[in-house]
């Protein structure tokens, strides 16, 4: 079952472009081992196409280090309008179809990053 959640959050240590709100879509997917290869092929095919869409800042897929059959597909969008356009696209339809057909469990979450700051301590740790 796909859970659609929309949240307004203020997060730390992410720099927003032009000081405007940024949208993040995260899709958590767990699959049976026999569906893993097909899911990864679908996600890989989608990555490049989504990255070419207007307003897409980033689009990546990550595997859980403790469970090779659990993934998170993260998209970052410049504006809510850009995300809304993407949600009506064929590419998002393919993602939803793959999630519905191949996943054991899934969750899709939409987050608005409206205000962020950097923490001086984090800067020191990374330098």
Image (spheres, grey):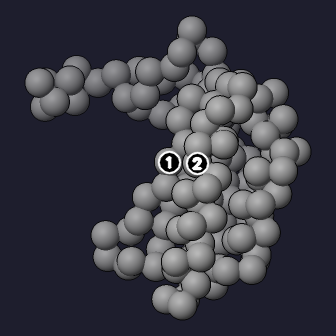
- Viewer-nearest residue: 126 or 98: 98
Residue tagged by mark 1? 60
Distance in Å between CA atoms under marks 1 and 2: 7 Å
Instruction: Name above or below for residue 7 compared with residue 63.
Output: above
Point 59% across, 76% down: residue? 38
Q: Earlier in the sequence, mark 1 or mark 2?
A: 2
Q: Which mark is residue 51?
A: none
At which x and y percent is residue 58?
53, 35
Q: Residue at x 63, y 15 (%)?
A: 20
Tag 1's secondary structure? strand
- Which residue is disc 2 drawn over? 47
The front one of 111 and 40 is 40
In terms of depth relative to the viewer, which is nearer, 51 or 13?
51
Q: Give the crowd class for mark 2: few <14, some 14-19, many >=20 residues within 10 Å.
A: some
> What kind of element bears circle 2?
helix
Label 1 environment density (alpha carbons within 10 Å; few <14, some 14–19, many ≥20): some
Question: Residue 104, image x and y in percent?
Answer: 63, 84
Rendering coords of residue 28 (x, y %): 57, 65
Which is in the foreground here, disc 1 or disc 2? 2
């Amino acid at each position: 079952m796909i859970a659609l959640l929309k949240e307004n959050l203020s997060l730390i240590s992410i720099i927003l472009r032009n000081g405007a709100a940024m949208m993040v879509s995260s899709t958590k997917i767990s699959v049976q081992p026999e569906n893993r290869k097909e899911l990864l092929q679908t996600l890989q095919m989608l990555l490049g196409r989504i990255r070419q869409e207007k307003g897409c800042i980033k689009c990546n897929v990550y595997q859980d280090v403790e469970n090779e059959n659990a993934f998170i597909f993260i998209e970052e969008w410049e504006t809510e309008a850009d995300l809304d356009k993407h949600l009506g696209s064929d590419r998002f339809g393919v993602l939803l179809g793959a999630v519905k057909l191949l996943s054991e469990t899934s969750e899709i979450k939409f987050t608005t990053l409206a205000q962020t700051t950097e923490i001086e301590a984090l800067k020191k740790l990374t330098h």
